[in-house]
Image: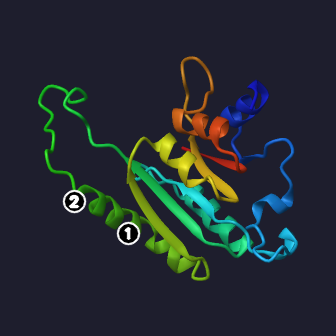
Amino acid sequence: MGSVALGVVAKSTRPVVLVRAGEEAADERAPAGDGGALTDTAYRDVVLGIDLDEAPDEVIEFAFEAARLRHTRLRAVHAWSTPGPIGLGSGDIGLLEHSGRGEEWLGFLKAVLLVWRDEYPDVEVLETVVDDRPSTALVRASTDAGLLVVGHRLAERPVGPRTGPVTHAAIHHVVCPVAVVPHF
């Protein structure tokens, strides 16, 4: 992706879907196991990269609607990282045992998506939390996806509009189409 695409994403107040050159509509579908045409197979999953610290409705709704229109599963992915002893600041507490932390995040993710499951009962949802950097987790999760949906916070910045690090990484490293949904 070049500077024009990044500029459009950074300044747009509407969702922007970035599709790599050479991508075809059939690429959003699962490969045919029997050698049949790709247009006859189901759509690949829609992956939602969700930051549970803000979880904006616009981004979640876009992902659910994309999955509904494709009659496919929505995989919601939240990545969290356990701070290491070097990353702790003065007065911060580092947990030596964080095995239950993933379960806590998973419970929170399910709670956040519960209202959306009720609104979109036909969409199958798979919630996933991983102890990893968000950009790395989304690149991995979208490897076999038909669409990745990420958010982009619209905020006044002293140096002008730009994308955040996770959105930037997704735009540059994810091979499937990427929908960037702005939010406040």
Residue at the bottom extreme of this rendering = 121
Residue 34 horizontal side relative to residue 90, left or right? right
Q: Amino acid at mark 1?
A: Ala
Where is residue 64 shown, x and y percent of the image? 61, 67
Residue depicted at 71% across the width and 31% down the height:
6
Q: Residues within 10 Å of mark 1 (few under 14, many from 20)?
A: few
Farthest residue toward the top? 159
Q: How many angstroms separate mark 1 from mark 2 (CA)?
A: 17 Å
Q: Position of residue 114 (x, y in %)?
A: 44, 73
Check disc 2 and give the amino acid type.
Answer: Gly
Count of numbered badges drawn on the protein: 2
Q: Is residue 59 above or below residue 33?
A: above
Compare residues 52 and 57 and report the one nearer the observer: 52
**Residue at image coords 64%, 60%:** 62
In the image, which disc is placed on residue 111? 1
Residue nearest the viewer, comparing 36 with 130: 36
Q: Quadrant of residue 160?
A: top right
Residue that mark 2 sits on = 100
Which quadrant, please, contains the C terminus? top right
Res 66 visible: yes
**The one of 97 and 155 positioned closer to us in this rendering:** 97
